[in-house]
Image (cartoon, helix red, strand yellow):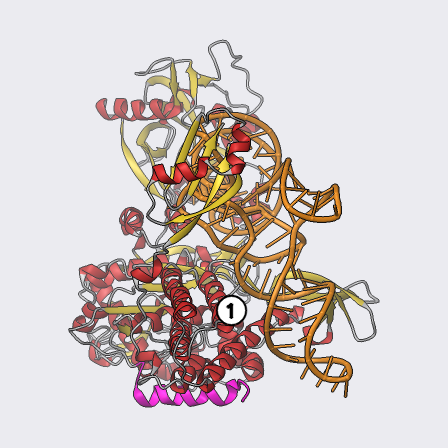
Amino acid sequence: MAYDASSIEPKWQAAWEQAGTFTATRSGDKPKYYVLEMFPYPSGNLHMGHVRNYTMGDVIARYKISTGHNVLHPMGFDAFGMPAENAAMASGGHPKDWTYNNIDTMVGQMKPLGLSLDWSRMFATCDPEYYGQQQALFLDFLEAGLVYRKNAVVNWDPVDMTVLANEQVIDGKGWRSGAEVERRELTQWFFKISDMAGELRDALDGLDNWPAKVRLMQENWIGQSRGLQFAFSTSEAPEGFDRIEVYTTRPDTLMGASFVGISPDHPLAKQLEAHDPKVAAFCAEARKGGTTAEAIETAEKLGYDTGITCRHPFDTSWELPVYIANFILMDYGTGAIFGCPAHDQRDFDFATKYGLPIIPTFLPSEDSSPELEEAFVPTKTEKVWWTRPINWEPEATGQEAIDATIDFCEANGVGQGVTQYRLRDWGLSRQRYWGCPIPVVHCETCGVVPERKENLPVQLPDDVTFDVPGNPLDRHPTWRDVPCPSCGAPAQRETDTMDTFVDSSWYFARFTAPRADTPTDMDEASYWMNVDQYIGGIEHAILHLLYSRFFARAMQITGHLPASAIEPFDALFTQGMVTHAIYKTTGTDGRPVYHYPEDVTLRDGSGFLADGTEVTIVPSAKMSKSKNNVVNPLEIVSKYGADTARWFVLSDSPPERDVEWTASGADAAFKHLSRVWNICDRIAAMPAEAGTQEPDEALLREMHKAIRDVTVNIESFGFNAAIAKLYAFTATLQKSKAGKDAQRTAIMTLAQLMAPMTPHLAEDIWAHQGGTGLIANAPWPVADEAMLTEDTVTLPIQINGKRRAEISVPADMDKAEVEKIAMAHEAVLKALNGGAPKKVIVVPGRIVNVVV
RNA sequence: GCCCAAGUGGCGGAAUGGUAGACGCAGGGGAUUCAAAAUCCCCCGCCUUCACGGGCGUGUGGGUUCGAGUCCCACCUUGGGCACCA
């Protein structure tokens, strides 16, 4: 009988479900293991990237079950967000219907993959049971001072009519709509993530099982810098502005200062603006400046001389002009700087334009000219020659001078060393309908009043329409107008909803007690947290993972997570994409025409259409509907079965790298599984003769090596290498002349080793060979050390580092004996030509190297 | 501009400082078959040799070492992150 996945796979999926194999249970006798893949957005389409992501998690989950763990492996949906509203606007339906229909569809696409998920824990973030608990968290955060409201210049997306976080603005465009982002001032809710910047940065060092790359990206994002904060005293300034605080990371260049610059949003600038139309005009112009990368790149440095002057802190007779400048950001440092044109290119450009002095504080060497063509900015670790050192040697590095200046300023009461972070607070308000409502009410007399917890969830109204842009909650009187929870007077609900990154910042904790009537159940959370292995895409390296780390800390402060869970993800793995070649020709209008893979015939690496036209092949492209190179998982499952798809996405490429889907590769995977199936059949049909000692032992030795290698590879995420070993062991078994018992042991072990990757086929082989119970519950095989050690080993003999011969010696032969045999080898005798070797290195069990 | 990572056959990729190229794809040869499909077996880095063998080979150039794909330095290329952050 041929291998038929379509009959095998549903059978075993039903068996697992009936046995409750993957329902997470607590018990004291086993360690727990929590494996989680980043939950999907319910777009309605499962793609190969999902299959790869979930298969990797599944391999880990199944492996951990068979190594005696209580495994939690849940799945849910990140279900709020704009595509649902966009769909409603486009087709007139309701975001809720669209979303829940898509969830049904995707569950239907996921189940045939045979994933070891505990479906009883499933939820979607748009379930009122979930977002109601999120509102409870919000209220607790509010009480703990972790959320606040402020007026802020925000990024406004004019197409989506919503505010975007800085991180959601890419090259000055909305991350989703691609529209040019405008600057608007609105009152917004913020999470105080910047308070934790130092802690979030320092704790990265403890995340040993995270990719170094992700830790580095977060470190750069948090952006710590050490510098000096001090004040210039002013003259001719309006009242209340007799000092201007500035922050600098280069206090060593203070003796080269030639102006003081303030942001157009600086309080002093605003003060001047109020009284002087010329200042107001300048500030308006400066603020308008585009936010696109090109605009910033090419923007001219603009300044407005306020007529105010500052006294240099080291020399009070030295006066510096105060400019309002368009390149100074209000929300970094103090919003004010001193400009040192000699050692900062921006300041250099500015000084050149406004005729300000350019005074170097250091030069490449003692005899260098002080005339500069451009700013001189060496690295801080390079030794340079100082023209006027304060308290350091004339030849010193920038870093040495910086440290010395901070010490000097602190000692003389001029300023103090300060650590600054680039990380800003997380603005969470969104002017959208399809999100978690912010549970507060605005009352004229009481101000911002939190909703009472017993009234949660503040549920989204269902009767809304999307025929006009903007937020339907704003124009829904019966939902919006409510009595104040505090005084009972007529008041209005907050109509902003939360950024969807909030939803995904704690779902992993909710999975530990998904039906609890508080956000978490501390007992369950203490048992299951942390996530032992988290798997997802590198695109979430910064936002989602940083926000989740913040949330875990905030949840600990508000009593929703134990202190042990403030770093919620013990280990992180970022998997690569599934790509596919693009086949294109050029149309009559000169534009590319993309062809479906099934319309292209491949011969010797070239591709042809049915009419013989050759197509251009672009390998390894991201799957995209517009490029006609999407491979649909359901089609693959119905053609080959889930096990083939799973096997393929794990083979060939290392999991952190992209893997290219190829039809020939999928065929090869299917053929291999068929081969294993046929071997199983053949062994079952073998007559039960007595085994023959030598072939039996040879087979079993290879089996134990396979156990060792596959185990090591699974534990280290080397799935492609594990699969390579399984191919090799299958070939050994196929050719084996061993007796039935040994072969039966081998095929059953092979099935066990394959079970994490191809669970259905493995179960079927197990049942076919009379295995006890489900292979999913069978204990993982253990390699027998005695079977791993060889009696004799083959040692290469190198002469001067080049391999020249081989000898076969007993594994435990001592060095001297090995050397004697090697020295008697004809290749060595020939190389020595009667002389004596300079040196002989014998590495037992490894190599012999003779130096002549 | 700053920071980081990676460069190995025709392709994807293996390789605790110890026989480079496991395994898969593509390619070639053979068995089986009336023939084909399917299946099975063998070959497959480059140059050279009838052959045995020899020479060269992990982006480039140096270095450390008995021995380097692996460690160190410089450079080149590709990919990624950040960027008017003082």
Q: Is residue A276 visible?
A: no
Q: Position of residue A724 (x, y in %)?
A: 49, 63
Callout 1: chain: A
**Magenta-drawn stretch contains A839:** no
Q: Position of residue A606 (x, y in %)?
A: 75, 64
Q: Is residue A120 visible?
A: yes
Q: Quadrant of the N terminus of chain A?
A: bottom right
Q: Does residue A149 appear left or right of residue A6 in this picture? A: left
Mark 1 lies on residue:
A731
Which residues are drawn in magenta?
A1-22
Three-letter amino acid code at the position of disc 1? Ala
Q: Does residue A320 appear left or right of residue A609 in this picture? A: left
**Magenta-drawn stretch contains A5:** yes
Main secondary structure of the magenta stretch: helix
| Residue shown at 53% from the left, 65% from the top | A176
Q: Position of residue A510 (x, y in %)?
A: 28, 73
Q: Does residue A602 appear left or right of residue A319 in this picture? A: right
Q: Quadrant of residue A317?
A: top left
Q: Residues within 10 Å of mark 1 (few under 14, many from 20)?
A: few
